[in-house]
Amino acid sequence: MKKIGVVGIPGKWSTETLADAIEQRTGFRLVIDMSKVSLDLAEKKLNYLDSDDKIDLCQLDGLIIKKISAEYNPNTLDRLELLLLAQSQGVQIFSSPEKIMRLIDRLSCTVMLRKAGLPMPETMVTENVDEAIEAVKKYSSAVFKPLFSTKARGMVIIDANNSDSQIKNEIEQFQLDNPMMYIQKKINLPGQDLGLVFLGGQYQGTYARVNQSGTWNTTINSGGRYANFTPSDEIIAIGQQAQDLFAMDFTTVDIAETDNGPIVFEVSAFGGFQGALDGIGIKAAELYADYVINKM
């Protein structure tokens, strides 16, 4: 019997669904909350405090990282560093912590995508307020994004039609929590954007996040809904190229159609089970569990 743990958020649907799928196939179930994990370098142990028991994660056969923290932040990277010890001790981890690290930080992901020549929104990254003001005026409307965030949390739109003093004030307020400012031209989307699902590098299907509330973004947190979508061969090829850069075991690539062609927003560090299920009817947890067991 393979002992495969699921790193995630206890009680959350995607984490529990994946743990269920692993248990059905192996008879073993362990959901790991990273806030309860301690690294003992002298003993080369990665201990998880489960109730009153300590479980050395280095003794497991495998780990699947479904979610490393409820929200992205620099501490998320520290948690991934802890898992590197288990990997060095022979535990197979899906996806590899090093690969996930490159996607948690929005800037790292963006640089990789642009170096590969993939189409993206116009972007400025700066710590300089004057440069940020110039970016707002150049873009007409700009989205200021935290380097560590998901589902549009913490994002701010600043419009060039505002007064210079208001623009400067809004930028300075954003910079209080975000010294390095990541600024993108606001794109007029056709009421939806797309999530292309990949498992083991193989394309599985595409769902759309459809705007339902009139907000500028399509996230489910903002009232969007999932729907099935059949993309063009061009969009699939762009998604494939984007995911190939990171070689994740399971991921989704966020793409939007624009008047100037498809653009890539990001490659997901963990991928969306809910979108795959509600939008495409794909039971991603079961497919992922089978994939992991076959790889092991």
Image (cartoon, rainbow, N blue to C red):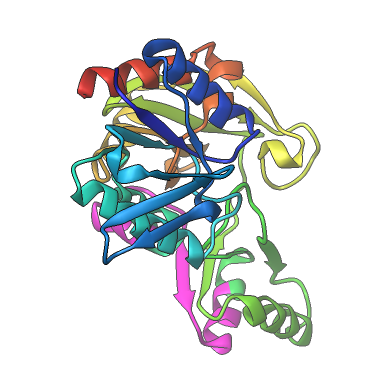
Q: Is residue 221 left or right of residue 114?
A: right
Q: Name the residue located 66 percent from the left edge and 39 percent from the top edge.
A: 218
Res 80 visible: yes
Residue 11 x %, y %: 65, 33
Residue 137: image quadrant is: bottom right
Q: Name the residue located 24 percent from the left edge and 40 percent from the top edge.
A: 91
Segment colored magenta: 110-135
Residue 178: image quadrant is: bottom right
Q: Name the residue located 61 percent from the left edge and 17 percent from the top edge.
A: 278
Furthest residue to the front?
A: 52
Is residue 46 part of the magenta span, yes or no?
A: no
Is residue 129 part of the magenta span, yes or no?
A: yes
Q: Name the residue located 70 percent from the left edge and 68 percent from the top edge.
A: 158
Task: Note whether 3 is above or below 149 in the view shown.
Answer: above
Q: Nearer the viewer, residue 24 or 104?
A: 24
The quarter of the image holding the C terminus is: top left
Residue 142: image quadrant is: bottom right
The quarter of the image holding the N terminus is: top left
Residue 79 x %, y %: 43, 58
Residue 90 x %, y %: 18, 42
Q: Nearer the viewer, residue 2 or 230?
A: 2
* Number of marks in picture: 0
Residue 106 x %, y %: 45, 59
